[in-house]
Image (spheres, coloured by chain):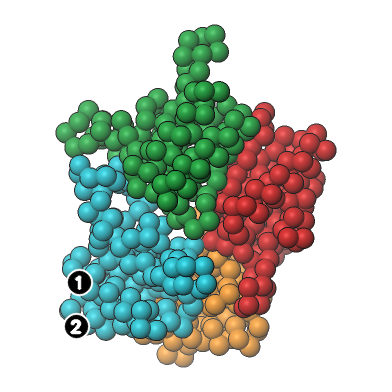
Chain colours: A red, B orange, C green, D cyan
Amino acid sequence: MNLEIALRMCEAALKQAGREGALISVAVVDAGGHLVTFQRMEGAEIAGPVLAPGKAYTSVAHRRTTAELGRLTAPGKELSGLAGDRFVCFGGGIPLWADYGEGERVVGGIGVSGGTVAQDVACAEAAAEVWRTG
Amino acid sequence: MNLEIALRMCEAALKQAGREGALISVAVVDAGGHLVTFQRMEGAEIAGPVLAPGKAYTSVAHRRTTAELGRLTAPGKELSGLAGDRFVCFGGGIPLWADYGEGERVVGGIGVSGGTVAQDVACAEAAAEVWRTG
Amino acid sequence: MNLEIALRMCEAALKQAGREGALISVAVVDAGGHLVTFQRMEGAEIAGPVLAPGKAYTSVAHRRTTAELGRLTAPGKELSGLAGDRFVCFGGGIPLWADYGEGERVVGGIGVSGGTVAQDVACAEAAAEVWRTG
Amino acid sequence: MNLEIALRMCEAALKQAGREGALISVAVVDAGGHLVTFQRMEGAEIAGPVLAPGKAYTSVAHRRTTAELGRLTAPGKELSGLAGDRFVCFGGGIPLWADYGEGERVVGGIGVSGGTVAQDVACAEAAAEVWRTG
């Protein structure tokens, strides 16, 4: 993960937010879950600086989209005991994979917050697409 | 609890992880819930350093497996208000009992995280078996 | 404070870091101390995501540069009891002022971390200059 | 950083502790500051599980030994405002460097706690020596 591609991922997320009519925050973290870049649109809620990095970190920590983690932590499901502040378990976080010679590893994550969950997911997907296509 | 047997429990958990094809973290804590040893396999997720000690601590704190605690904290069940970051309430944590002359007491705990819940439980069980058989 | 000018401030801070030969993180926060944008240069330390937003927040919270706050919190000085994790009390944070018709108010802050304190201050100053000159 | 070499570093630290007559905890973290392994000797204090990982994380976060950071955070020194719980600023933490093709980077850290500071430093040095000599 580096700042240059992280900024391009943010740009793609914000462009998608414009199409969605959503006001979002977007975060990109490295393999350790530490922030590389963050951007909050004018007018986006102050929960964004908490939730966008939180979703990005969570997607790295569990190597899953936070949408999938949301399904696994629903009442009666395998990880329902995972609730709490530490991990953000609903859509908008996507882990980023790469193979630098040791097999596929999670090397970073994206998190988007501020719109509806569907909008957050769409914006995060737009950013992840930048990652996948280089 | 001491480091020597804690290391042997880790070894058993990691060996079981190999059989399961899982990448795990394993933690052993003492009667105070404080870490004695911790090991994270190469490639295992960074949630492990949070969740494995968390499960070990939780199993000591409640004198129950975290799997059992997961059932008790399900919606509508007796302890459903226990959710939060403090206790990790799904399978992979096992309390360790001993009788040093004052009756059976919990003297430590094991926590495993990183695989499926079933894999985590199997690895923790392998470690607990070392404890039981000395 | 808005994202557009915040990004221009980041750009100025990073350009100054290049001149200084420093690897930095830079954060811009709003009047509520909440993150607007953050950028960490490739190779910059992981304390940056903690300290750069911390300095920016601290400069807003106290309406002072964190360098000045460092002097005030020195042993024997007026605010020496302020030490702790909540506020970051050494150079690199600068409050941003504006008069939107109600007199001069602090409307945001910049924080830089990763270089020497002198480098952090120089980078934050370069960003603040963008703010002052519009 | 991987578990195999981390365990060998722990072994070296514990062997040095034996020579010093100290009861210690030792932690090894990765480039993100996340725990790879931890060992606490029988009879070592329960502050160890807090301070040893804390020193290891701090040495990674600041790319300095915690001893050096202790000097920089002394009253009147450049970083005296860094005090708090987040970073552990006295001897016993050592960053570990490697060049995997992008220049020298901090790829992990060691932290030792439980003895005198001089003993902690000696044990951490013994572990770091294993890293340096492969």
Residue nearer the viewer, D84 or B109: D84
Residue nearer the viewer, B108 or A95: A95
Badges 2 and 1, same chain: yes
User: Relative to D130, is B132 on the left or the right?
Assistant: right
Residue at 55% across, 43% down: C38
Residue B103 seen: no
C-alpha span from label 2 to label 1: 10 Å
Q: Chain of mark 1?
A: D
Residue A118 seen: yes
Q: What amino acid is labelled 1 in the image?
A: Gln
Quarter of the rendering containing residue D35 = bottom left
Q: Which residue is mark 2?
A: D19
Quarter of the rendering containing residue D65 = bottom left
Q: Chain of mark 2?
A: D
Q: Earlier in the sequence, mark 2 or mark 1?
A: 2
Residue at 57% across, 62% down: A31
Determine whether the residue tagged by mark 2 lies in a helix, strand or loop: helix
| Quadrant containing the C terminus of chain C in the rendered view | top right
| Quadrant containing the N terminus of chain C in the rendered view | top right
